[in-house]
Amino acid sequence: MKKYSFTEKKDTRSGFGAGLLEAGRRNPNVVALCADLIGSLKMEAFIKEFPDRFTQVGIAEANMIGLAAGMTIGGAIPYTGTFANFSTGRVYDQIRQSIAYSGKNVKICASHAGLTLGEDGATHQILEDIGLMKMLPGMTVINPCDYNQTRAATIAIADYEGPVYLRFGRPLVPVFTDHDQPFEVGKAWMVNEGNDVSIFATGHLVWEAILAGEQLADMGIDAEIINIHTIKPLDEAAVLKSVAKTRCVVSAEEHNRLGGLGDSIAQLLVQRDPVPMQYVAVNDSFGESGKPDQLMKKYGLDAAHIVKAVQKVLKRKEQFVIA
Amino acid sequence: MENIAAQVRRDIVRMVHGCQSGHPGGSLGCTDYLVALYFRILRHDPSFNMDGVDEDLFFLSNGHISPVFYSVLARSGYFGVEELATFRCLNSRLQGHPTTHEGLPGVRMSSGSLGQGLSVAIGAALTKKRKGDTSLVFSLHGDGELQEGQIWEGALFAPAKKVDNLIATIDVNGQQIDGSTEQVLSLGNLRAKWEAFGWDVLEMNGNHMAEVIRTLEEAKAKAFNGRPIAILMHTNMGHGVSFMMGTHKWHGAAPNDEQLSVALSELTSTLGDY
């Protein structure tokens, strides 16, 4: 198992803030909008440097989505900022008609996604947003795993023509990817090559997958770990290549098991190369208040649950091969 | 201008009759406004590019009146009038509601789901202001559409942020699908509402060509004075076709062959039918 370490923990939303500033410096067409959550989205640095390229919309997310769509006419590249819940479900029809169907170059940037929002509870902990967004034709869906990858993704999407949903989070998590990494939309990242099982992980679950991989290595299980930061378009070649070798799969995501990364992979495999697969995801429920790590444990989204899922899928693989 | 409007009205009833589908009532009511806009008021280039830099832009928020929009775009040179015959047909660029998705020249935003166009128009106006582009943004909304909450988010935003390169027109025909706006959900005093939100408000008879042109010119003169401009445009739904006037029954219904003949007998062909 390849060694990964970290010297600090940072929130992915701060990676977004740093990336937005850098994207703004590189491209004068990058503008930002926020619906009364500047501090939460870490947009202060961009606003300080580019006050004329920022629009405070107030608590009016539907209007923000429409404004952003309209701003693209004339060449702006708008980044909208609010919580994931208010970036998707609350404004679904606005995104569908004014951005997706209209083909507008808007970057919908969504913080506080998933359970790790923590104490605010289920009203704010959206676990359906990946599914909602990936169902929209033409929408790109990205869920980076740490501060550096979020920063890199935020910069990269400015040069990626078309609507993008960029999903990140609130808690401090290990920074384990390279600071100046290249970020290619739609290209999976090989975290660890292995032969026994393919673990496809996204967002905060990538670090958990690494921890699980270390535990599995101690048990003599050689896990391949692949980071799917772009859920749509899915890097089908990377998934199929890995599965051709390992013949079983575990998916891991901070999302409802319905409609997330797991479903995208399962849909691909059932048509191209059916193998046993287990999901590490929320089991079709709402979240609740609590500390992020307590919630991830209770809802089955940590390294321990990935290890269990691997053990289960390895048993199924044996039976599958015999049958 | 009245002659062009008569031809556009012929196009509308023929398009809706042709596919036995579509929304003639609001289209006929807004014909004079759209003709005035595209043939007199807008600084625009029918060779069409999406960004429309240094051009005045128009956004149709109540997308169901697509027949009048398509006719006026075709008659002003965005695409050939013969394409009007494909309205609402399979493989057409003239979708039931306007969209950018099929690449129809002249359309910059999809609309149909109501209430979204004001925000979009404000966004386009903001980009113009940021880039020092001194052209204007126009939008059209139905009165029933004002029942959508997003309209009021935009109505609050534009004056607060001094979006003064925007002229939003509301088609006040008093009708919606389930009856009169008064019966369905009263809009109350619209002038007082828009003024209270901080808009400069003008009113006009939307079915009197000279008054429409005069009011739109007046609105243009009021631009860049720190406030967005709203025009309450009073129209007859179905204007120009006697049996369609003043009722919500022709909001989304197509005339039969006999009704089409009656309608066309009331509207002179001036530019030649498509």
Image (cartoon, rainbow, N blue to C red):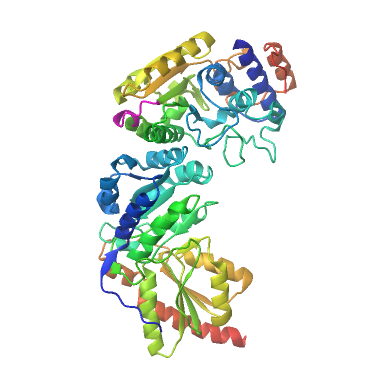
Q: As displayed, is residue B127 above or below residue A296?
A: above
Q: Say which residue appears at 34% left-offset and 53% top-offset.
A: A20
Q: Is residue A74 magenta?
A: no
Q: Is residue A258 visible?
A: no
- Nearest to the observer: residue A30 or residue B234: A30
Q: As displayed, is residue A243 above or below residue B272?
A: below
**Image quadrant where one finds the N terminus of chain B:** top right
Residue B50 location (% of width, % of height): 53, 37
Give the prevailing secondary structure in the magenta stretch: loop
Q: Say which residue appears at 50% left-offset and 50% top-offset.
A: A161
- Nearest to the observer: residue A29 or residue B228: A29
Residue B268 location (% of width, % of height): 69, 11
Q: Is residue A321 visible?
A: yes
Q: Say which residue appears at 26% left-offset and 50% top-offset.
A: A44
Q: As displayed, is residue B3 above or below residue B142?
A: above
Q: As displayed, is residue A318 above or below residue B238?
A: below
Query: What residue span does the magenta drawing correspond to?
Result: B158-165
Residue B226 location (% of width, % of height): 31, 24
**Image quadrant where one finds the C terminus of chain B:** top right
Image quadrant in which you'd find residue B77: top right
Residue A131 location (% of width, % of height): 47, 58
Judge from the rendering whether residue A55 lies leftward or rightward of residue B71; answer left or right. Answer: left
- The mark total stands at 0
- Nearest to the observer: residue A157 or residue A140: A157
